[in-house]
Image (cartoon, grey):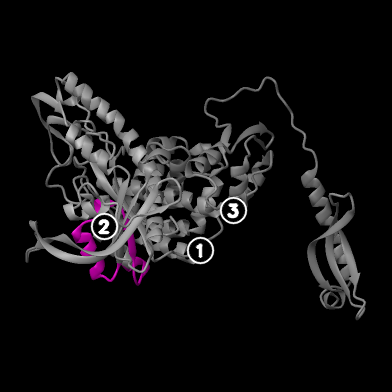
């Protein structure tokens, strides 16, 4: 590096700058400005001899740059042994998670809520450890505390500290959601028109459900998405049109999916100050209660509707060839109409109790029906295994209820199943229900969408509905990549905190996906960050051996340099410290 003096021909003024020399791809010598200083006549007001002063500064900068690139000597000691209590390998990939964590101001959020509390540990530190561990090494709280030395960061926490932190943060869920939505709105903006909603459940490794009189969110037997007999809790999750999580809520395991939408939407509408919400959801949420509730608020809906459970008149319209328009050469076809439909709304007594009897109300909506040969073939393939099992059960009846396949049982006459999917009774004589199979095959490939959005075309409505794959994939991320279940906790406050941690981890992963232009799945991002480890070489140096295009994209998105093969402890401390810039 050296001081460059450039004189303007127009007025003879000299401009000073510190530059460095390099050669381009053609081998031509060029210079690049490292630091612009200003005009000499202006600098003379502050310095007696600007040229001499900044020449010395340039020489010092050049010496520092050369020293940073100078070879380092390492002494290899053949007799050196590994220590059982040592941690020679540490993770640096967490720094990308740390950058987003601090960008969202989560450090300030948890520090502010710890004020005036007599804790002997940092709640923010505990949350960071649990979030990083949930992404990189998902497991129990004990395993998170036991592996805290595996990061290039300091986590001075006992297991009791971890559990105390869970208890403390469990009461701040609403404030956390509000804080995150504010930060995301400032940094990325929210799509406040379209929202995607779905419900899933998480099981516990326990045999007995919570007591019937338990208040709050109870672990109950219900319809498990994974067909498990364990007690579960329900989670309703809301995403915006950018596929970023907005909010979530927990419900007792025996809560029906359709009863969860209104509470979650009411909280989100208030939180986001949205003028009008269009909710997109699957057929399990397409009930009269949810439709009327949305319309009463001036909101809209895009719900799929079961063709199999539709009224005879509606089913006849869907299956009729009249009105269909074929698109492309692969047999895809669609049609739409504006029609009135009768929906049932639960009656409420003065004391608020819901009654089983319902009041019929009529809504006018746009109905979009479409048929896809690919969906028909997929439905048949997915059903084939269940049909084969059903036929096997008929040929050789099981002796015990536990030996009956729940998915296949619906094709067998003589097996009684309740609404929760529990097998109640098995008769001595079983027969295959060919009529049910024929009816399902007749409906294969047909789909129906009901919507209040009459000003949108049929193709646009289908595209909006197809966005639901994002929330389905999100649930897969929470269950597979973040391993949110089984839940190894029993206290309700700590269960609530567990899902707060999972929500934060999910949001950070989604933001990293968005900032890398959705090029990589959450699973791929988590894996490459997990593999970004350094091994202690000795004499203050760590050796890194993992770098790929995914880490390259993440580094560019978070301004973190993962390219260096070797870093000193000081280098690593600076790198990690830069991800923790104070949030306002």
Q: CA distance from mark 1 to mark 2?
A: 27 Å
Question: What residue appears at the point 52 percent right and 40 percent down from the top-left corner?
Answer: 524
Relative image position of residue 164 (x, y in whole percent): 34, 46
Q: CA distance from mark 3 to mark 1?
A: 14 Å
According to the image, label 1 marks what residue? 187
Q: Which of pointers 3 and 1 lies earlier in the amino acid sequence?
A: 1
Relative image position of residue 308 (x, y in whole percent): 22, 46
In magenta, the rendered stretch is 270-299
Quarter of the image with the N terminus in it: bottom right
Evaluate if marks 2 and 3 touch, with contact meaning CB atoms under 8 Å apart.
no
Are there few (<14), some (14-19), or many (20+) residues within 10 Å of tag 1? few
Q: Note whether 59 is above or below 213 in the view shown.
A: below
Q: Note whether 502 is above or below 279 in the view shown.
A: above
Q: Is residue 387 magenta?
A: no
Query: Which numbered dot is residue 261?
Result: 2
Q: Is residue 80 visible?
A: yes
């Amino acid at each position: 590096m050296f001081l460059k003096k450039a004189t303007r021909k127009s007025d003879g003024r000299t401009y000073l700058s510190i530059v460095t020399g390099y050669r381009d791809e053609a081998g031509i010598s060029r210079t690049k400005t490292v630091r612009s200083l200003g005009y000499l006549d202006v600098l003379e007001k502050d310095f007696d001899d600007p040229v001499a002063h900044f020449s010395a500064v340039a020489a010092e900068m050049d010496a520092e740059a050369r020293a940073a690139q100078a070879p380092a000597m390492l002494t290899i000691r053949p007799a050196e042994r590994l220590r059982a209590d040592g941690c020679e390998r540490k993770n640096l990939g967490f720094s990308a998670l740390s950058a987003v964590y601090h960008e969202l101001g989560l450090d300030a959020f948890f520090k502010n809520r710890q004020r005036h509390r007599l804790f002997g540990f940092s709640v923010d530190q505990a949350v960071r450890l649990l979030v990083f561990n949930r992404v990189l090494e998902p497991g129990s709280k004990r395993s998170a505390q036991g592996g805290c030395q595996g990061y290039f960061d300091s986590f001075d926490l006992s297991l009791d500290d971890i559990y105390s932190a869970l208890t403390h943060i469990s009461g701040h869920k609403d404030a956390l959601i509000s804080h995150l939505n504010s930060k995301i709105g400032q940094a990325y903006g929210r799509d406040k028109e379209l929202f995607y909603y779905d419900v899933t459940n998480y099981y516990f490794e326990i045999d007995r459900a919570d007591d019937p009189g338990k208040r709050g969110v109870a672990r109950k037997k219900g319809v498990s998405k994974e067909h498990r007999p364990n007690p579960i809790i329900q989670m309703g999750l809301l995403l915006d049109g950018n596929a970023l999580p907005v909010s979530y809520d927990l419900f007792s395991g025996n809560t029906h999916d359709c009863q969860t939408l209104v509470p979650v939407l009411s909280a989100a509408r208030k939180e986001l100050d949205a003028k009008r919400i269009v909710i997109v959801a699957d057929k399990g949420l397409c009930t009269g209660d949810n439709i009327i509730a949305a319309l009463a608020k001036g909101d809209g809906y895009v719900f799929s509707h079961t063709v199999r459970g539709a009224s005879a008149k509606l089913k006849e319209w869907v299956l009729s060839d009249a009105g269909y328009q074929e698109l492309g050469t692969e047999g895809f076809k669609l049609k739409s109409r504006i029609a009135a439909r009768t929906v049932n709304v639960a009656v409420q007594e003065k004391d608020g109790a819901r009654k089983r009897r319902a009041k019929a109300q009529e809504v006018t909506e746009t109905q979009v029906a479409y048929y896809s040969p690919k969906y028909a073939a997929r439905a048949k393939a997915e059903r084939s295994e269940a049909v084969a099992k059903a036929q096997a059960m008929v040929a050789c009846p099981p002796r015990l209820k536990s030996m009956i396949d729940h998915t296949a049982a619906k094709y067998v006459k003589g097996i009684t199943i309740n609404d929760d999917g529990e097998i109640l009774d098995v008769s001595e004589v079983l027969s295959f229900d060919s009529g049910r199979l024929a009816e399902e095959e007749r409906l294969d490939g047909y789909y129906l969408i009901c919507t209040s959005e009459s000003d949108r075309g049929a193709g646009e409505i289908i595209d909006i509905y197809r966005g639901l794959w994002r929330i389905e994939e999100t649930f897969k991320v929470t269950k597979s990549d973040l391993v949110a279940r089984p839940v190894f906790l029993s206290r309700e406050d700590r269960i609530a905190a567990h899902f707060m941690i999972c929500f934060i981890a999910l949001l950070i992963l989604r933001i990293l996906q968005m900032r890398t232009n959705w090029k990589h799945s959450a699973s791929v991002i988590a894996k490459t960050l997990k593999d970004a480890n350094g091994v202690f070489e000795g004499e203050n140096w760590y050796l890194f051996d993992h770098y790929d295009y995914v880490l390259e994209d993440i580094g560019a998105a978070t301004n973190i340099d993962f390219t260096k093969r070797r870093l000193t402890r000081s280098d690593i401390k600076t790198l990690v410290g830069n991800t923790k810039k104070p949030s306002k």
